[in-house]
Image: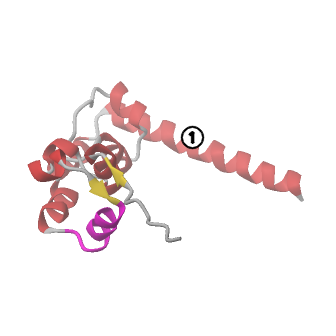
Amino acid sequence: MTSHQNTQTMKPATAAKKLGVYLPATPAEFQEGVVSRAELNELQTNPPQWLQDLRRNGPHPRPVVAARLGVSIAGLARGGVTEALTTEQIEALREDNPEWLEKERATQAEVRKEAARLKEKKAQQQD
């Protein structure tokens, strides 16, 4: 008895999220098809030019924008950033350093500090 393995596929939105790119900026054939696990692995290990360009120049999805600015996704929303941004727009925000960005970076730093404190406390309790 032979068992054949079904090819695992995902929606383009899921694949774009895993690749860290903004789906509407991807080529039409990517948006309209399904992506197999093997195709996703190939895209990750050997990205085509369009994927390299998107990762370098954007537009970037909000999680990538938030990470590049050092804030949370909620912090982006509080700052009025609800759309995907290009690398150039992200750099302009960094240079302008608006008050909301400074505040959100400070908030994010506090969140990370508290998370580290809790992790350390938990580790000490396990000892």
Q: Residue at x 42, y 35 (%)?
A: 104
Q: Is residue 120 left or right of residue 37?
A: right
Q: Report the magenta stretch's main SS.
A: helix
The amino acid type, in three-letter code, at marker 1 is Glu
Above or below, 100 against 85 in this view is above
Considering every residue shown, the one lying at the far left of the view is 28
Front residue of this view, candidates 124 and 64: 64
Q: Is residue 27 visible to us here?
A: no
Q: How is the image coloured?
A: secondary structure
Residue 107, given in percent of the width and then of the height, sits at 50, 36
Magenta stretch: includes residue 64: no
The residue singled out by tag 1 in the image is 110
Front residue of this view, candidates 41 and 101: 41
Q: Residue at x 18, y 65 (%)?
A: 52
- Magenta highlight range: 37-47
Q: Is residue 51 left or right of residue 38?
A: left
Q: Residue at x 57, y 40 (%)?
A: 111
Q: Residues within 10 Å of mark 1 (few under 14, many from 20)?
A: few
The quadrant of the picture occupied by the C terminus is bottom right
Callout 1: SS? helix
Q: Is residue 2 left or right of residue 8?
A: right
Residue 102, given in percent of the width and then of the height, sits at 38, 38
